[in-house]
Image (cartoon, rainbow, N blue to C red):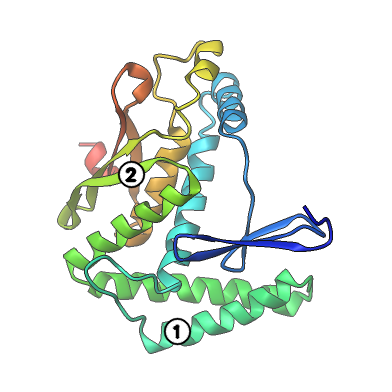
Amino acid sequence: MNPNGSINGNLGNATLHLDTSDGVLSLDGREIVLMRVKLIARLFADIMRNLPLSGIPHNVGRMLGEDYAVDWLLMKTPITGGTFELPTDLRRHTAEYERLEDQIDRGSLDPAILSAEKRMAETIREGLRHWLISLPDATLQRAWQGMLDLDIFGGWGRAKLIDFRRADSSARIDVTASFIARPAHIWYQHGMDQQHVCDFLAGYLEGEARVLFANEEIAGSEQQCRLEGGDVCSFAFRPVTSLMR
């Protein structure tokens, strides 16, 4: 490996780039990091064992899921069976946001730029919410499955949208080979082998659900974990109000 060069490759339709001079890995220009699944599982096991009521993995997952869903939509990724086109205002706002984000990525800490980037992100979130509400149910369902399909390339496991009910903002997703549950020995060592351990993934998918359903009240939970002996980890999503009935 050339320590002062770069390595390029393809990951699906995306371009993977590693700058060996500074160790920065990016996917289609967006910086990413890779980490061993075992290390992630050990981190979450320690958190969940010592801080069982903190909800840290779930909350972190939700924030990442929301951001990923927004990024995916703004990338105008083709949806299986067709494509959608962002409204003109959203395209313009997205272009401005990317311009500001590029300045920040290049090291700018100008308060005006940081403030403008934050405001633009909020504007885009609100615009997406109104736009998503207007989309047909089938289009929204294809969009979510498209997001889940892209996660495969991250090694997270294969996720399938089993049930999708837009009328009551509920859904069920099954994940084969969840990256959180795969290193079973870690959970055994922490005495958590009979528990639902994919709290981070439940939060991540909850974040996607909140964006796509345009509903901040949706809660997600793991209903079945492969550590219990099944083949999949199953997750359910519904508004908090329906959980309280």
Q: How many marks?
A: 2
Q: Earlier in the sequence, mark 2 or mark 1?
A: 1
The quarter of the rendered structure image containing the C terminus is: top left
Element class at badge 2: strand
Q: Is there CB contact under 8 Å for labels 2 and 1?
A: no
Task: Say which residue appears at 47% left-offset and 75% top-offset.
Answer: 124
The reply to whether residue 61 is in sight is: yes
Q: Quadrant of residue 95?
A: bottom right
Question: Observer-nearest residue: 140 or 126?
Answer: 140
Q: Which mark is residue 91?
A: 1
Task: Say which residue appears at 47% left-offset and 35% top-offset.
Answer: 179
Q: Tell me the crowding category of disc 2: few under 14, some 14 to 19, or many 20 or more residues within 10 angstroms, Cα based.
A: many
**Left or right of 228, for residue 186:** right
**Left or right of 175, for residue 138:** left
Question: Observer-nearest residue: 153 or 178?
Answer: 153
Q: Amino acid at mark 1?
A: Arg
The reply to whether residue 216 is in sight is: no
CA separation, marks 2 and 1?
29 Å
Q: Residue 67 location in percent, x, y?
A: 50, 59
Farthest residue in the front direction?
1
Task: Say which residue appears at 51% left-offset and 10% top-offset.
Answer: 191
Q: Tell me the crowding category of disc 1: few under 14, some 14 to 19, or many 20 or more residues within 10 angstroms, Cα based.
A: some
Q: Residue 69 location in percent, x, y?
A: 42, 60
Q: Amino acid at mark 2?
A: Ala
Q: Residue 211 location in percent, x, y?
A: 37, 60
The residue pinned by badge 2 equals 159
Task: Say which residue appears at 26% left-offset and 44% top-offset.
Answer: 241
Residue mark closest to the camera, 2 vs 1: 2
Q: Quadrant of residue 229?
A: top left
Q: Is residue 34 above or below residue 103?
A: above
Element class at badge 1: helix
**Left or right of 121, for residue 135:** left
